[in-house]
Amino acid sequence: MLTKTTTLNSYQAALGVKKRMNAAMRACASWAMLEEHDKILDMACVDGSLLSMLNDKMRLTLCGLCEMPEQARAVREMLDDADVISGRVDDIPWRSDSFDIVLLPAMVRGDAVRGAIQEAFRVLHEGGQFVMASSHVQLNEGGMNRREMMRMMQETGFTAVSCRKNLMCGALVGFKPRKEIEDAVK
């Protein structure tokens, strides 16, 4: 029988060995426009490897959202200064306008896609960047295609939405507009 302690210990053991980043994590990391001291959110922080790699490159304020509380606890122990909690991508438990960059290095399916995009928009500062992994293989397994996801990002309010290619997995990138730019367009 699995207990919470057993599950937590298995996560911690897995995290003890430095995890390699998958293609989606690498795509998000390569297209994120990071600056020193940015506050970033990994919306699919399974093992903390993306946050760990980004933190090795520069000083950042790290936040992560894990699906399960045991994952969040294990990542928090691995990354001392990170604010990692459990929750859903379509209901992010942070205040509006909290982050400079939001990363979604995992494919979200079904109704959660729209909610994840809307929540990413909500928690970003004006001018903030959203980078979402998009794999051709994953999209053909019943998910939306890139055009539909880009349209959904634009409908949510993201500007300069584009699809960036990376070897095995691309990324969809969009920016939350600044008020003065939005007012000038009107």
Image: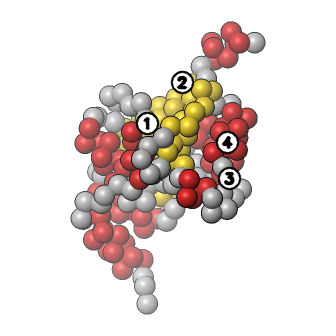
Q: Single out the mark in the foreground, 1 or 2.
A: 1
Name the amino acid type tagged 4.
Arg
Alpha carbon of mark 3 to alpha carbon of mark 2: how far? 26 Å
Secondary structure of the residue carrying tag 4 is helix
Identify the residue at image location x=33%, y=75%.
10
Q: Single out the mark in the foreground, 3 or 2.
A: 3
Q: For mark 3, what is the residue?
A: 144
Q: In this picture, is 154 found above or below 25?
A: above
Alpha carbon of mark 4 to alpha carbon of mark 3: how far? 8 Å
Alpha carbon of mark 1 to alpha carbon of mark 4: how far? 18 Å
Q: Earlier in the sequence, mark 1 or mark 2?
A: 1
Q: Single out the mark in the foreground, 2 or 4.
A: 4
Picture quadrant where residue 124 is located: top right
Q: Are marks 1 and 4 in contact (CB under 8 Å)?
A: no
Left or right position of 113 against 95? right
Q: Residues within 10 Å of mark 4 (few under 14, many from 20)?
A: few
